[in-house]
Amino acid sequence: MSLARKLTPSAMPDDVTPQMVKKIDKICAANRGKAGALIPVLQQVQEVVGYLPIAVQERIAEKLGVPGHDVYGVTTFYSFFSMKPRGRHVIRVCMGTACYVRGGKEVLERLERHLDVPVDTTTEDRRFTLEQVRCLGACGVAPVVVVDEDNHRKVMADKIVDLVEQYQ
């Protein structure tokens, strides 16, 4: 898909509502012409939509008056932006050395089985996105799992299902 083409309403994914598009337009209007606004705009829009599909990126480029390839480049460069739908809750399991040897691999495998998804995907109901990360910098309390903004330390595989089921 070309980021240079004009956006038509039918190009938006089904889960991007007209209300979301209005919010996107409002965010862009408030930031048009501001130096360094692209990353904050992408962050705000991702909060509204949940992810940044190509059609949304095109809309942002058009409304900010910037090249589409700039929007796409920033979106794909930074790991905190996602072009795929994400779950309401993001589970990050540390696979750094300390976490791995202290049971992180088993925690991750248990979550994959329980959620019935492989790593770096989202459950069908979009409740959870499961990710593995290289290091969370908490080696002394390994293994570490982060759910949304909540850090969980010394997480054992036999307790992980109960832990994530607390997140509705």
Image (cartoon, grey):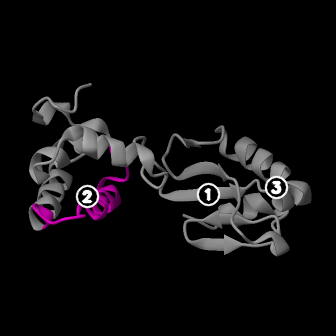
Residue that carries the numbered disc 3 in the rendered image: 104
CA separation in Å, label 3 and label 2: 36 Å
Q: Is residue 39 magenta?
A: yes
Q: Which residue is mark 2?
A: 38
Q: Which residue is mark 1?
A: 91
Tell me whether circle 3 and circle 1 mark residues in contact (CB < 8 Å).
Answer: no
Nearer to us: label 3 or label 1: 3
> Which residue is nearer to you in this view: 150 or 135?
135
Q: Amino acid at mark 1?
A: Ile
Q: Name which residue lies at 55% across and 57% down.
A: 90
Q: Please say whether residue 116 is one of the residues in the magenta stretch.
A: no
Which quarter of the figure has residue 29? bottom left
User: Which of disc 1 and disc 3 is earlier in sequence?
Assistant: 1
Q: Is residue 20 visible?
A: yes
Q: Residues within 10 Å of mark 3 (few under 14, many from 20)?
A: many
**Distance between the alpha carbons at the discs numbered 2 and 1:** 26 Å
Image quadrant for the C terminus? bottom right
Q: Which of the 4 quarters of the picture holds residue 54?
A: top left
